[in-house]
């Protein structure tokens, strides 16, 4: 009888410990925008090394990158990931670990400010002219202003936020 | 002949100078906008775009027009380095392209009926054709982001599209302080392009690029831009002054 009790105790303890450990798996930290169709054959496989153990960023089906802790402890400190080729430019992340968990991620490179971008390169062309806006009194036939729907505005702003967030 | 209607969540104005124009022509233009609204409005539960977003319609069953618009959106996304993107938080919203696309098609409808002097304006986006009643290029004011009753620039345009993207109509409460520096607090950008379809889709993307957007426009042949920041400083592309009205 005692053997059974001991066995069950061990089994449930182990189950309990496994469930407890599962809860500590990190949630996703990085997401990439979903594409409407497959436009690029480039693979994105950034890796962030963490002291003794490698933390692979797994590319799951719906283009979300998930960081999972494959080993229980990571050394405290900051770790710089490889430069990854994303659709719009380069991505490079720096992950900070404390007490075995990721506590922060910094973007060292993201397409917004990529120096390799030749399209939006503010240094390649001379500075553009500027002026203070001034009210004009003359009558006009038509007026152009941002009276568009909130959807479009939110779209504009969100795409900028998403670029900064997801790059 | 001039008519205004409230459609697609905004005011749409159609004005045709040519004397041959009939009420039925203007009505046909508005009917077209209604059909666009019925297909693309994310506010209408019965629209095709809403069916797509609810998962009731798959790509193989999109209408021809929807397929065409999605293709144009993807093309625009590539041309703007991803800054134009209709997919957000699990839903598609192509309105950043559809408005200019619709105005452009409506203008084409009038041209096919041999009308040469007109403009169509929808929610601040404009396609001009020919001249006004005085025989001069249409004058277009750029609305001040700080005083909606004032214009800060007056343009003189013929056969061009003028689109303005901005934040002031919806308030700054969506700003995220972390990204303000990157967006450089741009409140308005006006794009002049060869047609309103191109001007509108670029205006959407350029606004999302923040301050760098004006440099993107500088690099696009055939496009000029006027970008205003929250301090009231405007930055403009090098050939923009060619469109300023001298009156």
Image: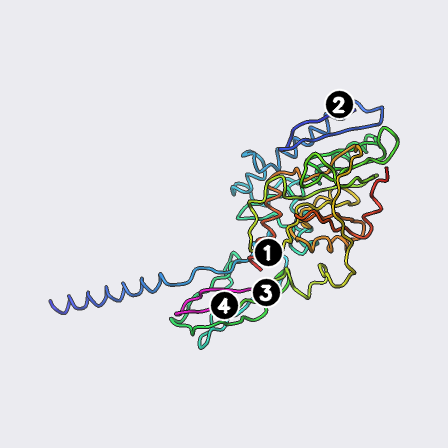
Q: State the CA–CA distance, disc 4 to disc 2.
A: 64 Å
In the rendered image, residue B146, in percent from the top left (x then y), is placed at: 67, 40
| Residue holding disc 3 | A91
- Labels 1 and 3 share a subunit: yes
| Residue holding disc 1 | A163
Residues marked 2 and 1 touching at CB (< 8 Å): no
Q: Main secondary structure of the magenta part?
A: strand
Give the camera-side residue of B202 and A78.
A78
Indicate the chain on which mark 1 is placed.
A
Reply above or below: A118 against B80: below
Q: Earlier in the sequence, mark 1 or mark 3?
A: 3
| Residue holding disc 2 | B24
Q: State the CA–CA distance, disc 1 to disc 3.
A: 11 Å
Reply above or below: B70 against A136: below
Indicate the chain on which mark 3 is placed.
A
Q: Which mark is residue A95?
A: 4
């Amino acid at each position: 009888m005692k053997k059974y009790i001991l066995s069950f105790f061990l089994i449930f303890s182990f189950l309990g410990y496994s469930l407890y450990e599962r809860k500590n798996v990190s949630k996703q930290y990085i997401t990439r925008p979903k594409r409407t169709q497959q436009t690029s054959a480039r693979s994105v496989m950034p890796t962030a090394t963490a002291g003794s153990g490698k933390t692979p960023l797994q590319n799951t089906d719906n283009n979300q990158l998930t960081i999972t802790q494959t080993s229980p402890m990571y050394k405290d400190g900051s770790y710089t990931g490889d430069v990854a080729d994303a659709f719009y430019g380069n991505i490079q992340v720096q992950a900070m670990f404390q007490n075995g968990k990721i506590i922060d991620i910094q973007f060292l490179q993201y397409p917004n400010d990529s120096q390799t971008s030749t399209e939006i390169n503010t240094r390649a062309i001379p500075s553009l002219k500027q002026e203070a806006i001034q009210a004009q009194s003359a009558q006009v036939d038509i007026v152009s202003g941002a009276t568009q729907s909130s959807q479009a505005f939110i779209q504009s702003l969100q795409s900028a936020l998403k670029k900064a967030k997801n790059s | 002949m001039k008519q205004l209607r409230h459609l697609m969540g905004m005011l749409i104005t159609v004005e045709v100078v040519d004397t041959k124009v009939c009420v039925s022509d203007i009505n046909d233009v508005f009917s077209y906008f209604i059909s666009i609204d019925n297909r693309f409005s994310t506010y209408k539960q019965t629209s095709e775009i809403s069916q797509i977003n609810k998962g009731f319609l798959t790509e193989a069953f999109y209408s021809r027009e929807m397929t065409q618009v999605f293709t144009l959106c993807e093309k625009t996304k590539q041309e703007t380095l991803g800054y134009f993107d209709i997919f957000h938080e699990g839903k598609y919203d192509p309105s950043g392209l559809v408005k200019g696309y619709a105005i452009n098609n409506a203008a084409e409808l009038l041209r096919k009926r041999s009308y040469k002097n007109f403009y169509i304006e929808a929610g601040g986006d404009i396609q001009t054709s020919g001249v006004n009643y005085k025989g001069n290029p249409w004058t277009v004011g750029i609305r001040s982001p700080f005083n909606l009753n004032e214009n800060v620039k007056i343009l003189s345009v013929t056969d061009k599209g003028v689109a303005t993207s901005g934040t002031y109509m919806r308030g700054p409460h969506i700003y995220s302080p972390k990204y303000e520096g990157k967006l450089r607090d741009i409140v308005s950008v006006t794009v002049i392009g060869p047609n309103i379809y191109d001007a509108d889709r670029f205006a959407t993307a350029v606004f999302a690029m923040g301050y760098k957007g004006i440099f993107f426009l500088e690099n696009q042949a055939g496009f000029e831009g006027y970008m205003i920041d929250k301090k009231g400083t405007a930055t403009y592309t090098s050939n923009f002054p060619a469109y300023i009205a001298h009156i």
